[in-house]
């Protein structure tokens, strides 16, 4: 089980189901705190998907309930149309 967190202004900004978002890896190890832009499945049920997502609000306050997360793919930070 991996642990991630993300920042949102409100829970309404975090849809259930498939979404694209920036997540920060909190799993201990060499790449702890690295940001990733991902397409993932989200659920407010903490046991639905294998990984956990901690929710932080704009000023860093931690939401008491963790979401569950399954990363489908890692997306590039910069869209391909801007790389050429």
Image: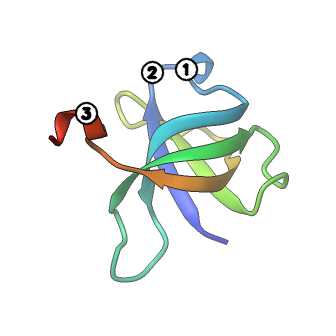
Residue at 33 percent of width and 82 percent of height: 30
Residue at 35 percent of width and 74 percent of height: 31
Name the residue furthest front. 84
| Residue at image mark 2 | 9
Above or below, 78 relative to 11:
below
Q: Secondary structure at mark 1?
A: helix
Q: Which of label 1 and label 3 is nearer to you?
A: 3
Specify the quadrant that holds the C terminus: top left
Label 1 crowd bin: few (<14), some (14–19), many (20+), radius 10 Å = few
Q: Which of label 1 and label 2 is nearer to you?
A: 1
Residue 70 percent location from the top left of the image: 68, 55
For the residue pair 69 and 28, the one nearer the viewer reads as 69
| Residue at image mark 1 | 13
Label 2 crowd bin: few (<14), some (14–19), many (20+), radius 10 Å = few
Above or below, 58 relative to 37:
above
Left or right: 54 in relation to 37: right
Q: Earlier in the sequence, mark 1 or mark 3?
A: 1
**Colour scheme of the rendered structure:** rainbow
Above or below, 3 relative to 84:
below
Residue 35 percent location from the top left of the image: 35, 55
Q: Secondary structure at mark 2?
A: loop
Label 3 crowd bin: few (<14), some (14–19), many (20+), radius 10 Å = few
- Tags 2 and 3 in contact by the CB under 8 Å rule? no
Residue at 69 percent of width and 44 percent of height: 41
Specify the quadrant that holds the N terminus: bottom right
| Residue at image mark 3 | 81
For the residue pair 45 and 70, the one nearer the viewer reads as 70
Residue at 52 percent of width and 57 percent of height: 4
- Tags 1 and 2 in contact by the CB under 8 Å rule? yes
């Amino acid at each position: 089980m991996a642990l991630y967190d993300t920042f949102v202004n409100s829970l309404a900004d975090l849809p259930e189901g498939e979404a694209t978002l920036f997540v920060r890896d909190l799993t201990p190890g060499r790449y702890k705190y690295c940001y990733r832009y991902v397409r993932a499945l989200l659920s407010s049920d903490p046991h639905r998907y294998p990984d956990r997502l901690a929710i932080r609000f704009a000023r860093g306050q931690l939401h008491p309930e963790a979401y569950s997360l399954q990363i489908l793919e890692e997306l590039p930070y910069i869209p391909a149309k801007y790389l050429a």
